[in-house]
Structures are given as C-alpha cells and as structure tokens.
Image (cartoon, grey):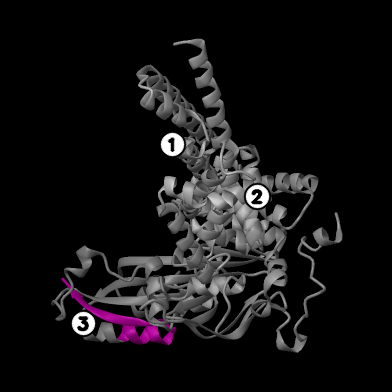
Amino acid sequence: MNAHQSLAIGQPIETLEPISPAATEPDAMVRFEGISKTYPAYRGKPGVNALQNIDFAIPRGSITGVIGRSGAGKSSLVRLINGLEKPTTGRVIVDDRDISALAGRELRLAQRSIGMIFQHFNLLSSRTAADNIALPLEIAGWSKADIRARVAELLALVGIADKHDRYPSELSGGQKQRVGIARALATRPSVLLSDEATSALDPQTTRAILDLLANINRELGVTIVLITHEMSVVRQLAKEVVVLDAGHVVESGHVADIFTHPKHPITQSFLAEVIGDSLPVSLASRIVSEPYAAGQAVIRVQVRGAGAGDTVVARLARELGLDVALLSARIDEIGGQHVGSLTLGIPSGEDAVTRTLAWLSQYQFSAERLGYVA
Amino acid sequence: MSPELINLIIQATGESLYMVGIAALLGTAFGLPLGVFLATSRKGELFAAPIVNRVLGIVVNATRSTPFIILVVAIIPFTRLVAGTSIGSTAAIVPLTIASAPFIARLVEAAIREVDGGLIETASSFGASPLQIVFKVLIPEALPGLLLALTLAVVSLLGYSAMVGAVGGGGLGDLGIRYGYQRFMPEMMLAVVVVLIALVQLVQSAGDYLARRVNRRLRHR
C-alpha cells in the first residue's frame, strides 16, 4: 500500500488540525456546540429552522438513540455528523475534529471514519453483495488484494458469507441491511450512523439487525448513533438517548433515567408507545365518578425503577389489611429499569382510598384515583 | 434483381453502417459526458453550475429542433473544415454526429436522472469525489438505460442517414431515392426498405439483449 492508502484505514489524519483538547471532554465521540441549521426560503417555500440551540455530546463507544417524530430535525442532525451538510451556526466535533470546518478532500478523508446505514439500504443494484461492500474501499484507494480480504472478513462479521456473489435483488431486506452494515464498517470507522435502519424491516428482522449492531458495538467499540422514530429501537439497543422535537433537544441522558421520569410531553408519548397508557376497554367503560356501595375504587400506580413494582400489591394488602384487586398491569423494562403502571381495585370507602394513596406516596409511588367500578 | 443492383445494395449498406457506426461512436463520445453533465449540474447537484446547465440546455434544444436536412446544408462550411470535404460518406459523418450528440445527451440525462438520489448521498457519505460518483455509481447504475438510449440513437441515425444523399453521402436511403424513386425501380425501393428494417431489428434486439443482461434490478432469486 502507498501512503495515500494507509490514510484510509481509520488512522488519525495528520494533516488535519486537532482542536484544542480543552474544548472537548475526553469521552465525547460527537459533540454539537451551539448548532443551528436553517434552510433558506427557496422557490416560494418558506425557510425552515430545522435545528436550534443544539448542544450535546455522544459518548465514545456508546449506543446513543436520537428519537423524534418526523420533521423533528433528525435527518439534519445526522447529515451534520457526516459533513453532508454544514451548520448555519456552531460546530460539530467528530472524533476530536471539527468536521463542520472541513471541505473538499479533507472532508472526504474524514468521512471515511464515519460509516452510515440507511432505511432503504441504498445498495447499488449493479453490484454484488461483495462489490457493494468493496465500494468504500475502492473509493479510499485500497488495493484489489486488500479489498478482497477485507470484504471476506466483513461478510463473515455480518453473517452472510454465503451471499458473496448475490445481487441486492436476490437478497431479503434483512440481508440487504447486513450488506449495508458491512459496507458502512468497511473502512473501520469510529462512528456508525444508523438512519432509520430498521424502519423498513419486520419486527423479527429488526430484532436480528439490532442484535448485530449491539455485537458490533461490543466487539469493535464503534460508537453507534441510532436515528429513529421508533421507541422500541431505542429501548432494545440504546444506553443513551436524545429526544428531539421541532428542532430542539428536549431531553437527553441515560435511557433508564429519561424514560423512568419523562418530563417533556413528547418523551411521555414515546414512552406510552411501549408501555401503553390506556386502560383495557372493558375496564375503562365501566368506570364512573361516584362510588358504588360495595364496589371498588380504581387507582393507577406508576411503576418506575429497578424492581419497583415487584411487591407493591402484596405489601399494600398486607400492611393496610385491604383486599387489593389487580385490574390491569403493564410493566416493561427500559435500560434495566421497570417502567409501567398497575391499575388496582380497592374497597371504595373514602377511608381506604385515602390510606392507600398516602401509603403509596410514602413509598414514592405516583398514583391517582381514576374513579369507581361496581 | 441483377448482380450489379445487388452489389449496389451491399455497397450502400456498407456506407450506411460506416456513417452510422462512426457517428454513433462520436455522438456518444460527445453526448455521454454532455448528458451526465446536464443531469448533474442543476442547483444543488453534484457539479452544480445552473447557468452553464441552462445555456447548454438551450444549445441542445436548438440543435434538436433544427430539421436534419437543414442542419446538413447549414453546416457545410464547418463540415469542410473538419472533414476536408463537404461531400461523401465521411463528410456526412459530421452532421450526423452533430445531430446525434444532443439527442444522446438528452437520453443519457434521462437515464442518469433515473438513478436513485439516495445512492449519490450514500457514496458522498463514504467520501467519494464527484468523479468517483459518476464512474462508480451513476454510470454503472444507469447502464441498462444508457444501452437502450444508445440503441435508440443508432436507430434514429439510420433514419437520418437516409437524408445525407443530399450531400453525396451515399448509403441505403440515397440508393432508395435515386434508384427506387427517381428511376422507377420499385423492387430496389423494396429491397432497401427490407434491408433497413432488418438492420433496425438487429440493432434493437442486440440493444435489448445487452440492456437486459446488465440489468440486475429485475433478477429474482
């Protein structure tokens, strides 16, 4: 290999000025500093403020989910990371380099250390699986022999070594995305961007692809940025999450913290997608606002945190001496934390209700009285 | 039909193939890059140069809207400059090339625009240069369309070549006019038409076959 080729293999590029160490935390792989992105008015369409006041860091080696509804600015955000777009203000630091300041050849060299996978796979229909994976290596100027060896390695890594000579039209969606992942990893990038990479796949295939991404993160140490509108993707894979809404970061942090105590309505709505916040129809239709004589009061208890919901029903019944009925329950696990709700029926007397709510709040459970059933 | 007439047909077929073949090669040599440029030089595209794009578009349209027979006569001084003469098969290649290049360019432009824009973005995200995108993504992905475009251009050139008899270009069309029409030899006219039909069929079938062979999009498992 000549000097030009050796640059391609994910080594730091000497010619690029590293930014001063003081400006970055040592553990940030991607850092947005005062980013805004405005698309100017064009042909009668008004201008759009796609992103505003974006300041956050994606930790090195993490799997970070960026979740938002369509139009929240996710695509703009991911295109800023790989330099396909320039911010209107601020800068984007990727692997200690200010990628927003690069252009031309310098930018193209830096882009080789940032892999990307796409919702619709974006494979070349004219190339076999192996040749698709070879594309970024050809672009980086690798020799034929090096490419052949690397492609074989990558096909094995993503578990489709037998599809070497298949064209994309002969592959299933999951297999195509595996080719996409192998291609994105070809030049040994330090960051892998996933732009809705599982949105076109069925749940089973999604699961398999997310498992593959988790393995890659664990074994290669690649930082993974998951752009998605699906809460289930964040829940299964991400440890860190950034919630985007209307071009703003509304919440960010550990997945477990954010989703056990969601503050912003948009975060709460994403959580509701996973744990559900509606009562079973048969129960909801029977709830009235006035107590029945021998009926039950319906109380909903929010469950947040490791093991939080395990014993609440039993302890409530034992400590207050009440007959507690479990009317409905939904508890899921997000980032190792239990998140969900229990709907309980207790004797409808005012005294029992007051004691129950007091007991629950004493143990930091958030609870509300929904009404009464017969 | 006498052997002399058959020889005439063979000779005219040779002239037609010579003119059309060379003009198609030259037309592609100019038309392919021009078409790729037209397809990639609007605002925000790979080689964004909107004004050049607009100007080239007008030139292409102007050439394409000039009737071929007028083009042949109008550019006689230019033909003489390039080919050294303004009559004969070789001279006829000049107007044929000038007529086919913009035609091919428009067909190439359409074929290239068919390529999914997501692939350009994908290659850009790997750090591909604009030229790498053209040669490694756009042209290979558009290849079936490009082959069909070229086939169409060759068929059109066969039609155009019938008119270059006006400048002594020879070829099948010229033979048909002079013998079949002006000398009242309907069997000659028929023979010329049959040969032309056979040629067009041959070219079209070959083009279709090649385009199908390189098209990996339609293959099934």
Give the chain of mark 3.
A
Pinpoint residue A213: horizontal percent, then vertical percent: 60, 58
Q: Is residue A360 magenta?
A: yes
Please tell me which residue is depicted at 43% across the width and 57% down the height of the picture.
Answer: B61
Asked whether the residues under the numbered discs 2 and 3 touch, taking CB atoms below 8 Å apart as contact, a structural biologist would say: no
* Horizontal arrangement in the rendering, residue A115 relative to residue A300 (left or right): right
Residue at which label 1 appears: B159
Does residue B92 lie above or below B39 as drawn?
Answer: above
Q: Secondary structure at mark 3?
A: loop
Q: Nearer the viewer, residue A67 or A307?
A: A67
Residue extending farthest to the top is B2
Pinpoint residue A286: horizontal percent, then vertical percent: 16, 69
Mark 1 and mark 3: span between their CA atoms? 97 Å
Q: Residues within 10 Å of mark 3 (few under 14, many from 20)?
A: some
Residue at which label 3 appears: A349
The image shows a total of numbered marks equal to 3
> Which label's residue is closer to the chain start, 2 or 3?
2
Residue at which label 2 appears: A133
Q: Quadrant of residue A87?
A: bottom right
Q: Secondary structure at mark 2?
A: helix
